[in-house]
Image: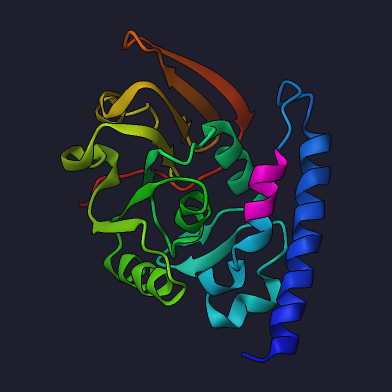
Amino acid sequence: MTDDLEATFAALRDLMVAEIRLHALAASEALGGRGISDRVMNVMRAVPRHRYVPPELRAFAYYDSPLPIGHDKTISQPFIVALMTELLEVAPTDRVLDVGTGLGYQAAVLAELAATVYTVEIVLELGHEAERIHESLGYRNIVHRIGDGSGGWEAQAPFDKILVAAAPELIPEKLILQLAPGGRMVIPAGRPDAQQLYLLERTPEGQTRSEAVLGVRFSSLVRPS
């Protein structure tokens, strides 16, 4: 890829970040006054989203909208990626579970902030392509698995943070139990026509509390047939 094209993509990322800021400002009342930190914005500016969409859609990679990636899946809207990442409050020492790898964009954003990201994808082809992309970009702190993410990843639990990029009707208890005391989980949940993005926190004593943050629309988190 030429230097000129890389420079164009970098400029488009700057425009994407500006649009995310405007979106966050417009939604600030619904978000309870929350914004998106410079730390998260800098990661959004750094991660090459065009590498995580099909080649024929790269011209649209930096629009603030979801895009299809095949197998009836999408890459999430950049504003939603930034918001979910912000809500997690990822620390440099964190072990993070990412459910619903897709082509790996959200996992890459998390990997810029965390010690290790464990990412699970149910669609074999997407999971393998995501791993190839991550390897080509030099990520060494992302661990991949093909499987049913609704059950989490018990062998690697507990996790300091959990992010889920598909929506169950009810938050799976198995995921809650894999969240470390003091941890946070961001997950969409609800019926397809009434989904909310939830922030769930597990107290140091092991109790849980949750907060509905924003109305969203995600594909369903389903078990394999």
41 up-or-down from 102: above or below: above
Magenta segment boundaries in residue numbering: 37-43
Q: Nearer the viewer, residue 90 or 63?
A: 90
User: Residue pushed farthest bottom?
Assistant: 2
Image coords of residue 121 (percent x, y): 32, 56
Q: Nearer the viewer, residue 205 or 121?
A: 205
User: Residue pushed farthest left?
Assistant: 155
Q: Nearer the viewer, residue 56 or 7?
A: 7
Identify the residue at horizontal 69%, vertical 78% (top origin): 59
Image coords of residue 66 (percent x, y): 61, 58
Image coords of residue 73 (percent x, y): 45, 60
Left or right: where does residue 52 sit relative to residue 46? left
Left or right: where does residue 69 sit relative to residue 221? right
User: In the rendered image, is residue 216 in sight?
Assistant: no
Identify the residue at horizontal 61%, vertical 25% (top origin): 213
The structure's colour scheme is: rainbow
96 up-or-down from 3: above or below: above
- The rendered magenta stretch, by its main secondary structure, is classed as helix
Instruction: Indicate yes or no whether the magenta region holds residue 42.
Output: yes
Instruction: Indicate yes or no whether the magenta region holds residue 136.
Output: no
User: Residue pushed farthest front?
Assistant: 93
Identify the residue at horizontal 71%, vertical 75% (top origin): 9
Hey, which quadrant is residue 84 in on the image? top right
Left or right: where does residue 176 sit relative to residue 220? left
116 up-or-down from 34: above or below: below
User: In the rendered image, is residue 21 in sight?
Assistant: yes
Left or right: where does residue 190 sit relative to residue 100? right
Identify the residue at horizontal 44%, vertical 61% (top origin): 104
Image coords of residue 203 (percent x, y): 40, 12
